[in-house]
Structures are given as structure tokens and as C-alpha cells.
Amino acid sequence: MLLISTTNQNSSKKVQKKPILTNSFLLIVCISLFIGFTSSDLQLDHFIDLPGLKKSGEDWNVLFQDINPKKGHIKLHHDKWLMYFLHWRPLTEEKKNISIEYVRKLMLSFWGPDMPFTIKGNGGETEIFGHNAYFIEGTIYNGAIHTRFIVWNCPETGRQFISDCNINLRLGTPEYLLETQRQITQTIRCHEGFSKTMPDRFPGTYESEKWNLSFNIPVNWRTAEFVNKKWFPNGMSIQNGSLWTLLTDSRKHLELLWEETDAPLNTDLFKSFLERITKPFTHEDVTLQVTQVKLESVKEKDGYYMGEGSYQFKQVVKDKEYKSDYTFKALLWKKEKRIYFLIASLIGIKEFWGIKNDLTPSDKTLEQYLHLEILPNIKELDRNFLK
């Protein structure tokens, strides 16, 4: 049943000072379902170019497939996780002389004993906005999280900066995203004149006169203040603060349905396919279901129907229920004897670690996800519809 509204709930948390499996969505990544069977020669690759989806390094998982010529349904899911912090602290006398060894000790102590890093490699030197910088790398949770610290001093503002770069390898996060965080760090402007002297490396920009900071980020990343009451009981200041930059497309969901039918394409048929994706499916102790669907709009154009809206993705694990909000775009079209329905969605996280942080994907991010990533890899799509 399609509902009028949806409740904003999200239990997603970054892997933090608890075992990594506290992130409920790791349960999804661990699932590899094959439900249903086919007596024909049709396979998933007849409908979806899975290697094409994965060519950017993202690890799409097949959660469900029921494939036959008359009627079928495929569910794919992908998630990745990263967190890019930028911390600044007062530049005291004991912090003025930094080195690789200084950064190594800082990494081992910065997050406390609940983050027992294992140092990897010998570290090195670099330069950030004219300042000498030093870096070191480490892992935690048996190699699940890969972290890089880059540290430099800014005498002009009396601050020490720590670029705290993190990716979750266990979730299949592409390793190049750790390098992306290094490249973001190279764009940081930490004192006066920053807005005119550094070239843009990424299309997005975070700029704050309040914190006398600026840097470039990809368009699908979003920066906010890290409101940590333990670190900043009286609030952040220009001498003592932290920012965190997270993804607005960290979890992706894709479903493709088809049916041989003579029914005409119209809004009612669009809604009937949308209702089909709400059927729960279960594997072992985990039940997954799309629920609380809200269809915002649906329009006909050039022989196909396009709609958009939101839903909640629900998991039930040992009587515990977890919900996350998603935003979607959906497409209904006909090719020869089959009618196809595609729904592509991105998670809209509202908080991490109990801290409010709106990571709802922008319209541009959702459009690029659909048109640049998903549609080119749907084999049964008539490309003429989308010219």
C-alpha cells in the first residue's frame, strides 16, 4: 500500500568506538541472496551489465533475483563508507616541532583506547598550503578501517591541523577514496588569502569565514561541523574545532522488474509496479522490506513514465527493527512484449553517532546517479527515450 507520508528515521552509525558490526547495514552487505530459479537461458546479465556497474570500483551485491521470460525481479544493493575529518587545535609550544614520529603518536592517542590503531608503513612528508606536513597510516578492527593522518602547523592562525582520512574496506569501499581525501587535503586554505591562491581540484567547495577555512570536495560529499560535546563542551571556536565530510550516496539500491503484458503504460500501472517492490524477503534471521513509499510525482514523456519519491528500507533482525530513508527515481517503459520498471535510490541519512547531519542527496547527485551510473548499464532500456 502506498502511503501519503514517511517518517524520518535512521539508525545508521559510522563504525566508531564500538565493534564494527554495530552498523546495522553491515548486515545487508553480508547478505548474498539467490531467491528463485529459472528454467530458461535468461540470466541477470541479459538485463543488467553488472561489470559495468562495478567498473568504478563499487561492489554491487545481488540481494534477490527471480528471472524468467514472463515475469522477473532483480534487487541490487551497494554501500561504501568513508569519513573525512578536519580537526584544528591550538598551536601550543609543545606542538611546534612536528615529525612523522609525532604524527604516529598522535594517531595512536587521538581517538583514545577504543581506537587501537596498528601503524602501517613508515609515513612521509608533504606540503599543505605552504606548510610542511607529515603523514602516517594505520588500520583498526583487523584491517577493516584504513586511516591516514596528515598533520601540519599554521603559524599565521596559531593552529595545528589534522586531516583525518578514513575508509571502510570491509564494506568494499574503493581504496581510491582514501587518495581522494588526500587530494582534498591538498586544497585546504588555512589562513588569509585562501580564496584566491589555490586552484579548484573538485567541483564542490566548503568555505567558512567563521573558521577561516576553505577546501574543495566532490559534489556528492557534504561538510558539516562535528558537534562533539565531549571535545567542545562550550562549542567550537576558531582555535579548537572539527569538521566532518561524508557521502550523500553512501548506500545505493536498485530494482528492476518486468512482465509480459498487454496493459497500457499509464500512472496506475506505474503505481502497481511500485507496490510490488514492497514485498518483504528474508534470509536467515534478516527480513528486508521497502515500506512507507511516498510517490511525489509521475510524468509521461516520449513513450515512457518517470516518477520520483521516497521510501524507508526496513530490516528486522532478531526482533529488532531498523529503518533508513531513501530517495528514488523510477522509470516505466515497454520494449517489444515486455513492460519494465526500474527504481534507483540513494539513502538519505539524517544523523551519525547521534549527531544531526543531513546527508539527503541533492537533485543533482540523484540525477547523475540515475543517468550516468544506472541507465547506461540497463540493457533492456531504449536509449532513444532519454535523448
Image (spheres, rainbow, N blue to C red):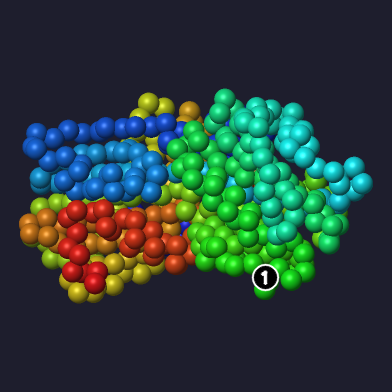
User: Which is nearer the eye, 337 or 171?
Assistant: 171
8, above or below 231, in the image: below
Q: Quadrant of the N terminus?
A: bottom left
Side of 55 where 131 appears, left or right: right
Q: Is residue 101 visible?
A: yes
Category of crowding for the residue at label 1, using alpha-carbon neighbours closer than 10 angstroms: few (below 14), some (14–19), many (at least 20):
few
Side of 260 where 2 appears, left or right: right
Q: Position of residue 203 (x, y in %)?
A: 52, 66
Task: Tell me where residue 77 sits by quadrant.
Answer: top left
Q: Position of residue 240 (x, y in %)?
A: 82, 53
User: Which is nearer the eye, 113 or 354?
Assistant: 113
Q: Secondary structure at mark 1?
A: helix
Q: Is residue 351 visible?
A: no
Which residue is depicted at the point 74% across and 28% down?
A: 113
Q: Which residue is mark 1?
A: 197
- Number of marks in the image? 1
The amino acid type of the residue labelled 1 equals Thr
User: Which is nearer the eye, 92 or 85?
Assistant: 92
Which residue is depicted at the point 67% across and 73% down?
A: 196
Which residue is depicted at the point 80% across and 56% down?
A: 154
Task: Tell me where residue 301 sits by quadrant.
Answer: bottom left
Q: Position of residue 67 (x, y in %)?
A: 17, 41
Side of 41 where 369 appears, left or right: right
12, above or below 38, in the image: below
Q: Quadrant of the C terminus?
A: bottom left
98, above or below 348, in the image: above
Which residue is depicted at the point 76% across and 34% down?
A: 101
Q: Position of residue 345 (x, y in %)?
A: 39, 55
